[in-house]
Amino acid sequence: MEKIIQITAGRGPAECTWVVAQVLKKVLEESQEWQLETVLLQREAGQENGTIETASLAVKGKNASQFVNSWIGTIQWIGQSQFRKMHKRKNWFIGIFEIEPQKGVLVSENDIQYQAMRSSGAGGQHVNKVSSAIRATHIPTGIAVVSMDSRSQHQNKKLATERLLKKLEDETLQQLKNHVGKQWENQLNIERGNPVRVFTGSDFKKNKEQKSYKGTRQKLKQDFRNENN
């Protein structure tokens, strides 16, 4: 299971970009507790030192969906601005959104074309005479690599295949980063109500959820008495 999220300050001020940086740390820390793998796909630094405008993460693991759902929505920080000491505002908001992942490139052996070629460069007469180098080309994308590390054509074919698969993987990741970079419209959709998580103070502690059922129990008891009177 893989999920991709974007943590963004939207069009918020520097205080919000500081909150993004703190939330990113919290997400990474909590993902370790959940035994999830995370990959930072994109990060845009804010204007102030140690701040982040937006960051995108890939979250992988058995409970990735449940973990991501616990963070999706508006995040609120209640605290004094570290950049404008006299600023009266105490509530700052950022957003966390899920991004639809792009489909990766499925590589089939039939999609790879191999071509033997003469090695070039240093290596003596033996290298120039033997067609041991291999060019591997992924036909659907046109991406190609060459291996001339070994005198063995078989070994070069194996190395070329490994390099081609790695290059295709890197290309897919780059496309994903570009895709994430186009999600800036999310920054215009940050809602300032009903935050999914609230943090407070310069130490960025999570607000404890108050779960007191005393008032509810008393009301139920009173209703029960009234019904039996």
Image (cartoon, rainbow, N blue to C red):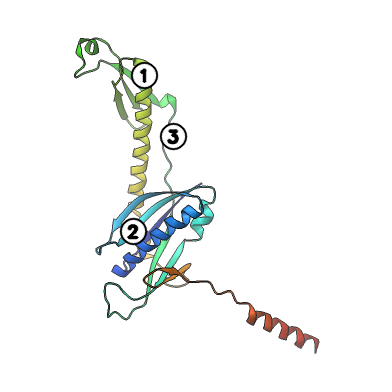
The numbered dot on residue 180 is none
Q: Mark 2 belongs to which amino acid?
A: Thr
* Nearer-the-camera pick, 209 or 136: 209
Q: Mark 3 belongs to which amino acid?
A: Leu
State the image coordinates of residue 131 (x, y, percent, origin top left). Answer: 28, 13
In-image side of 189 versus 35 (left or right): left
Q: Which residue lies furthest to the front in this view?
A: 203
Q: 10 Å neighbourhood of mark 3: few (<14), some, or many (≥20)?
A: few
* Nearer-the-camera pick, 228 or 101: 228
The numbered dot on residue 155 is 1
Q: Which residue has dot 3 on it? A: 106
Q: Measure the alpha-carbon separation of dots 2 and 3.
A: 30 Å
State the image coordinates of residue 226 (x, y, percent, origin top left). Answer: 75, 88
**Mark 1 / mark 3, whichever is N-terminal:** 3
Q: In this view, does 63 lie above or below 212?
A: above
In-image side of 27 versus 81 (left or right): right
Find residue 22 and report its image quarter.
Answer: bottom left
State the image coordinates of residue 144 (x, y, percent, origin top left). Answer: 31, 28
**Mark 2 / mark 3, whichever is N-terminal:** 2
**Can you say which quadrant of the picture contains the C terminus?**
bottom right
Q: 10 Å neighbourhood of mark 2: few (<14), some, or many (≥20)?
A: many
**Mark 1 / mark 2, whichever is N-terminal:** 2
The numbered dot on residue 54 is 2
- Between circles 2 and 3, the one closer to the viewer is 2
State the image coordinates of residue 85 (x, y, percent, origin top left). Answer: 27, 77
SS at mark 3? Answer: loop
Q: Which residue lies furthest to the bottom in this view?
A: 229
Q: Measure the alpha-carbon separation of dots 1 and 2.
A: 44 Å
